[in-house]
Amino acid sequence: MYLLSQRARQLAEGLAGLAIGGLLLLAFGTALDVVMRYVFARPIHGFNDVVPLVGAALLSACMPHVVASRGNIAVDFLGKALGTRPTRWLDGFGAGVTALFFSLMAWQYARFALDMKQTAEVTPVLRWPVWPWWAAVATFITLTALVALCTLRADAAVHDETPGKAQGESA
């Protein structure tokens, strides 16, 4: 189980690295569009069509890494006050809720992408179909849910190993 968790973490990290590179390019394009708009009165044609779609896909591509690296919000002070066993339970509960939340989001984004495809929704200026971008978001959110499940399973395996006990030793 640890190997699966490590692979999920590596995949998430690589994907986030690519997404961050894309977000930097998007930010550079935004700065260039502003300069072109105000200095030359010639904005980049259709850039306002591109930003929300590409931005949504790139940001959602970062979510698996956030979950894999435990970058999401956790309330540790309660667990520290309650002790080790309740902390394990709270960590597992939090990971389970995270997996469930992202599963529900993935389902809704997939429905949204399918609706965009069925209605042939396109961007106003460039006339690009929008459904592939939302399908990419749904894919990345689905991947996030799977990463959350991997971390949940890995946590359960780690928490089952009691420190100080040799394997095969009884309590």
Image (cartoon, grey):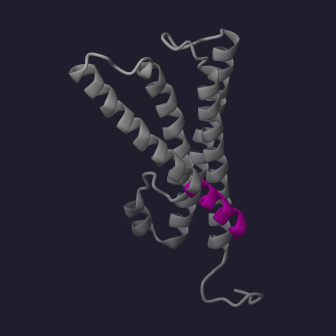
Is residue 108 visible from the viewing direction of this image?
no
> Magenta stretch mostly in which secondary structure?
helix
Foreground of the two, 22 or 93: 22
Picture residue at 26% right of the left edge, 16% below the top: 41
Give the left or right position of residue 42, taking residue 53 as reference.
Answer: left
Foreground of the two, 2 or 24: 24
Is residue 124 visible from the viewing direction of this image?
yes
Picture residue at 69% right of the left edge, 69% below the top: 2
State the image coordinates of residue 164 (x, y, percent, origin top left).
61, 89
Res 140 quadrant in image: top right
| Total tally of numbered discs in the picture | 0
Picture residue at 37% right of the left edge, 37% below the top: 27
Most distant residue in the left direction? 39
Picture residue at 67% right of the left edge, 48% below the top: 146
Foreground of the two, 107 or 47: 47
Most distant residue in the right direction? 168
Range of the magenta residues?
1-13
Compared to residue 134, the image places residue 126 above or below, namely above
Residue 77 sits inside the magenta stretch: no
Res 167 quadrant in image: bottom right
State the image coordinates of residue 51 (x, y, percent, origin top left).
44, 27
Residue 5 sits inside the magenta stretch: yes
State the image coordinates of residue 150 (x, y, percent, origin top left).
67, 57
Compared to residue 137, the image places residue 68 above or below, namely below
Q: Quadrant of the C terminus?
A: bottom right
Q: Quadrant of the N terminus?
A: bottom right
